[in-house]
Image (tube, coloured by chain):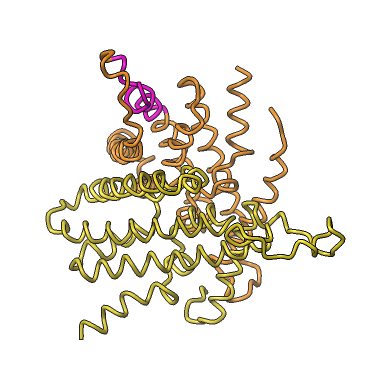
Amino acid sequence: MSGKKNKDIFLAPFSKDNPVIVQILGICSALAVTAKLEPAFVMALSVIAVTTLANFVISLLRNTIPPRIRIIVQLVVVAALVILVDQVLKAFVYDVSKQLSVFVGLIITNCIIMGRLEAFAMGNKPFPSVLDGLGSGIGYGLILIIVGFFRELLGSGTLWGFQIIPQSWYAANGGFYENNGLMILPPMALIVFGIIIWVHRSRNKELQEK
Amino acid sequence: MENLLSIFVKSIFIDNMVFAFFFGMCSYIAVSKTVKTAMGLGLAVIFVMIVTVPINYLLNQYVLEPGALAWISPDLADVDLSFLSFIIFIAVIASIVQLVEMVVEKFAPALYSSLGIFLPLIAVNCAILGGSLFMQERAYSNIGEASVFALGSGIGWWLAIIGIAAIREKLTYSNVPAPLKGAGITFIVTGLMGMAFMIFMGIQL
């Protein structure tokens, strides 16, 4: 019985309860790091790690946290985890960590994490909380990777730094193609995002707002 | 003086928190349905920003930076606490927000009733933490510059949320395709506003 429920907890955030495009949480970082696929992927992994661990820790502590100061306690736990992630990124993928700049720190205020802690980890046992954190993190990561894929492909003609659009297509080499420079600028992230929401909601009619 | 003015204008228009860095998007989308509530949140953000950034600036300068502890004793000159900055900044922000909430409740009940519900939201608004982190990354040379940057960023955020709220109030009369209603169209409109703000990009002050 609990097996089915746990599966639900884990899978719901992928699509019909996606934290980014349905609940509109954690947008700041989702938009800012997606000009290229690689930072988007690293960011997604970092957020998955932080949500999962933070959900686990808060769920263990849930009966000892006084309700009045719970936000501060949660922030401190999350901040400690983010420091760990930041140090790990600086040690192993220094270039990406430089590109992400302040956005690693901003994982602390990523609303997905606070939202899951408030809504789930404060009232549930550690194991479901871990699943919930993992599910939400992956749901967030999926969107990041979709946005990053389109922005890098259309904006720079590359994926993960590798050239995808053949060089001979470019107008500079006598072809017909030109990269859409607008895609890597901030406003286009918002518009790509709006389009993803559009597609997603026209397939899931129950999510449409009145 | 000119330098301060340039930081001020730059942080409002060119490096606008919302359009250039997407800071505080969650509350930007969630609280922009009417101009009145948007105004409340915007003012609260400006206020918390100009309080927390200078405090974090001082902490960064005298506690966190490599060698910052030298003022206590020369032995501490090679201590580098900068890895603690996230936790210190967020602790300062969360406690200042709590403090501001209590002070405002006690001394300005009218302001509290209009701002009050937004204050707890602000502790987790990325614009505030982003302000402190940018202040650290850009290494402003004195507290005046840091405060002006904070004021400018706060005003920039306020301007953005007022703008989108006004547009969304008008949008309720338009015939938006059903799947785009609410969040979808807000993103696209914000994108268009962002493009409009891009005209400031090349300006050198």
Q: Position of residue A34 (x, y in %)?
A: 55, 57
Is residue B170 visible from the viewing direction of this image?
Answer: no
Is residue B46 visible from the viewing direction of this image?
Answer: yes
Image quadrant assignment for residue A48? bottom left
**On screen, residue A1 above or below B49:** below
The hue used for chain B is orange
**On screen, residue A81 above or below B61:** below
Q: Position of residue A147 (x, y in %)?
A: 56, 64
- Residue at the outermost bottom position: A1
Q: Main secondary structure of the magenta part?
A: helix
Residue found at x 45% / y 49%: A93
**On screen, residue A3 above or below B107:** below
Magenta-tinted stretch: B54-71
- Residue at the outermost right position: A174
Q: Looking at the rendering, in which quadrant would you find the N terminus of chain B?
A: top right
- Give the side of residue A41 with respect to residue B7, left or right: left
- Give the side of residue A76 with respect to residue B113, left or right: left
- Give the side of residue B14 with respect to residue A117, left or right: right
Q: Looking at the rendering, in which quadrant would you find the C terminus of chain B?
A: top right
Q: Nearer the viewer, residue A208 or A190?
A: A190
Q: Position of residue A137 (x, y in %)?
A: 38, 64
The hue used for chain A is yellow
Residue B91 falls within the magenta-colored stretch: no
Q: Nearer the viewer, residue B196 or A186?
A: A186
Image quadrant assignment for residue A18? bottom left
